[in-house]
Image (tube, grey):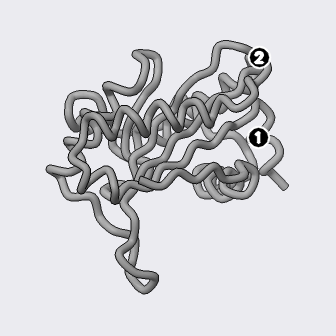
Amino acid sequence: MSIQRPLFEERFEEVSVADRGSAQAPDLEHRSFSVAETAGEAYNEQAFRYFLEIERHRSELSGRPFLLLLVDLKRDSVSDLEPQIQPQTAERLFSALTQCLRDTDFLGWYREERTIGAVLTQDSPASGTGISDVVARRVTNGLRQELPASLSARLHLRVYELPPNAARQSQP
């Protein structure tokens, strides 16, 4: 299993532009979507992105950061496209991740059948030093315990610590 602790600014900008579609905040009250459950705990991509947007707004209002955890499969070679996560594998991953996360965290498809996402809310207004490293280690260890070695060796895990003003920073 590889762990990558990227700089949130670069990736978050890509994510927020794709999610928002415009520089204005979305109308969260009038959005509709269906929630597809996998392993009883996971949202489909549309629902997950909706709740991610709500968490961004909460973060800005509360002044508290949050963590975005992303898990996908490693490519077999550089020329391979992004690997698809098969339904049986997804069920095992969602089940294992549920064991690693708190009840207040939410889990779903960040990119349908490609990338699993989890949002971990933070209690303190100031981000803790190395909190993303602590979470990455905790989740990595949990996945290694819950999953077969052949699957955990193929996982690529990233944790992004997103400060409360990250959404504003990514807007032009």
In the figure, residue 98 lies in which quadrant? top left
* 161 on left or right of 106: right
In this rendering, position of residue 19 left or right of residue 37: right
Mark 1: give few (<14), some (14-19) or many (20+) Cα within 10 Å.
some
From the viewer's perspective, is the residue at label 1 or at label 2 nearer?
Answer: 2
Residues 60 and 144: in front is: 144
Residue 35 on image: x %, y %: 30, 35
Identify the residue at image location x=75%, y=28%.
129
**Is residue 35 visible to the viewer in this orientation of the structure?**
no
Q: CA distance from mark 1 to mark 2?
A: 14 Å
Q: Amino acid at mark 1?
A: Ala
In the rendered structure, the answer to whether residue 58 lies left or right of residue 153 reads right
Q: Residue at x 40, y 35 (%)?
A: 141
Choose between 9 and 50: the one closer to the eye.
9
Quarter residue 41 falls in: top left
Q: Position of residue 101 (x, y in %)?
A: 41, 25
Q: Which SS class for mark 2?
A: loop
Q: Position of residue 135 (x, y in %)?
A: 54, 31
- At numbered mark 1, what does the secondary structure look like: helix, strand or loop? helix
> Which residue is denoted by mark 1 in the rendering?
166
**Whether residue 162 is situated above or below residue 14 in the rendered picture:** above
Residue 22 image point, x, y percent? 69, 54
Question: Which kind of residue does numbered mark 2 sit on?
Answer: Pro
Q: Which residue is mark 2?
A: 125
Task: Classify residue 122 as left or right of residue 103.
Answer: right
Kindly identify the residue that appears in the image at 17 percent across and 52 percent down: 87
